[in-house]
Image (tube, rainbow, N blue to C red):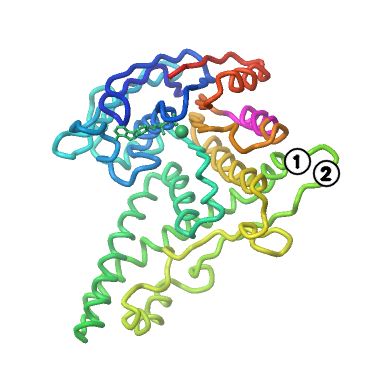
């Protein structure tokens, strides 16, 4: 619990109007490339976390040629059922409701339906820019603490205002120091909140990531590679207020805020070098799963209700041993329900059979 028992999609991506029913904890989704497996998982992401896992705008999820979409999901908890809907109106307004009652703020919904999504392109989490790793942390922490997303939104808005002001100060040589001080006054508490929550969460995550990585990468007769993980934030060493004050002239000159939680990163090392530089594709994939399953573990610990897990193209680009380690690990954790997609119905069925747990397969 909460377990998804029905999903209906209307004018959502490639779906005109479709409805699906689930009565098992493990649901395999199969179909050829392009049939809509990933879109199907994204619909569940929308219902739980109010937005797409992939597209930046809600509009991009509307079926081409249509205006707006509607998603509905029935979630069964131990003693009651909730109907969650997510509707994008013609006006572009998005409405989330639970049992017909509209949810006023997305921050009130996020966290009630905890979810982890694992997609093949997520290896960018390891090889990509630092913002991808911050997004990983943010997505997790937003589901842990209701105040986090509010602070993150505030921080980002203030940062934009601050940068616009810095630009004006540099270009027009005007002095807006009172306005800048007023912005900083609000930026500092928001930034400090983000830093504190990130440090706490990463400290809980690191031992889990290391443990899971070793288990996934483990092969009989071979020793696994030692990896190290470190959270880097300028706020680890300096008070945020001081950082902003000390860098004010430089910020004006460069026309942007050079220091703060928006520069945080997670460094992952192997044999004293950057993991992303020397790791093989298999190792990257193992680490990706370790990062995601560690997040799942943290969510599971925090919540009364275990998270939903969405595994997109799980069996691609992973060797047989790693797949087996991984599947075992997934079911060692407490998950309310798992949705797994695969293009090959046979491969999916044979992997699920090995679990000796009830499952169902939906063919798209
Ligand atoms: N907004 C949209 N409207 C219509 N079709 C879309 C939209 N967004 C994506 N698609 C289509 O969805 C299909 C891809 O679905 P996807 O879920 O990625 O497939 P799969 O994961 O099964 O390979 C593509 O054919 C793409 O054109
Ligand atoms: Mg896909």
- Reply above or below: 267 against 180: above
* Magenta span contains residue 327: yes
Q: CA distance from mark 1 to mark 2?
A: 7 Å
Image-quadrant location for residue 106: top left
Q: How many marks?
A: 2
Q: Residue at x 29, y 29 (%)?
A: 12
Point out which mark residue 309 bears.
Answer: none
Residue 25's spot in the image, x, y percent? 52, 19
The quadrant of the rendering that contains the C terminus is top left
Drawn side of residue 149 relative to residue 28, left or right: left
Q: Identify the residue under disc 2.
A: 222
Report x, y in % for residue 239.
46, 72
Vertical order, 29 against 68 (above or below): above
Horizontal side, residue 182 vs residue 77: left or right: left
Looking at the image, residue 304 lies above or below residue 279 = above
Mark 2 surroundings: few (<14), some (14-19) or many (≥20) residues within 10 A: few
Front-lying residue, 169 or 62? 62
Assess whether residue 146 is covered by the magenta stretch. no
How crowded is the residue under tag 1: few (<14 C-alpha within 10 Å), some, or many (20+)?
some
Callouts 1 and 2 close, C-beta under 8 Å = yes
Q: Which residue is mark 1?
A: 218
Residue 172, image x and y in percent?
19, 84
Q: Residue furthest right?
A: 221
- Per the rendered image, the range of residues in magenta is 324-334
Seen from this angle, which residue lies furthest front?
Answer: 33
Q: What element does badge 1 sit on?
A: loop
Q: Secondary structure of the magenta portion, mostly?
A: helix
Residue 294, above or below 275:
above
């Amino acid at each position: 619990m909460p377990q998804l028992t029905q999903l209906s999609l209307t004018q959502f991506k490639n779906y005109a109007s479709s409805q699906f029913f689930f009565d098992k904890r493990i649901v395999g989704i199969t179909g050829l490339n392009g049939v809509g497996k990933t879109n199907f998982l994204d619909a569940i992401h929308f219902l739980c976390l109010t937005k797409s896992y992939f597209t930046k705008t809600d509009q991009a999820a509307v079926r081409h040629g249509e205006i707006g979409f509607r998603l509905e999901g029935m979630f069964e908890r131990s003693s009651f059922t909730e109907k969650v809907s997510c509707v994008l109106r013609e006006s572009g307004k998005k409405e989330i409701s639970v049992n017909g009652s509209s949810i006023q703020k997305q921050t009130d919904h996020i966290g009630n339906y905890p979810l982890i999504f694992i997609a093949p392109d997520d290896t960018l989490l390891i090889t990509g820019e630092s913002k991808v790793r911050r997004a990983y942390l943010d997505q997790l922490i937003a589901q842990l603490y209701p105040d986090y997303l509010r602070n993150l939104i505030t921080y980002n808005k203030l940062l934009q205002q601050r940068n616009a002001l810095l630009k004006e100060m540099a270009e027009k040589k005007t002095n807006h120091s009172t306005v800048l001080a007023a912005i900083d006054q609000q930026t500092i508490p928001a930034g400090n909140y983000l830093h504190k929550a990130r440090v706490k969460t990463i400290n809980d995550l690191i031992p889990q990531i290391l443990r899971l990585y070793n288990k996934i990468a483990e092969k009989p007769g071979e020793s696994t590679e030692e990896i190290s993980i470190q959270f880097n934030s300028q706020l680890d060493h300096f008070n945020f207020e001081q950082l902003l004050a000390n860098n004010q002239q430089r910020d004006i000159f460069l026309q942007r805020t050079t220091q703060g939680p928006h520069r945080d990163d997670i460094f992952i090392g192997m044999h004293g070098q950057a993991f992303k530089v020397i790791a093989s594709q298999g190792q990257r994939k193992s680490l990706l799963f370790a990062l995601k399953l560690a997040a799942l573990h943290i969510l599971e610990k925090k919540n009364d209700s275990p998270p939903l897990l969405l595994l997109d193209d799980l069996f691609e680009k992973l060797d047989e041993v790693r797949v087996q380690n991984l599947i075992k690990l997934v079911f060692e954790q407490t998950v309310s329900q798992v949705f797994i997609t695969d293009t090959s119905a046979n491969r999916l069925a044979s992997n699920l059979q090995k679990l000796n747990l009830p499952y169902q397969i939906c063919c798209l």
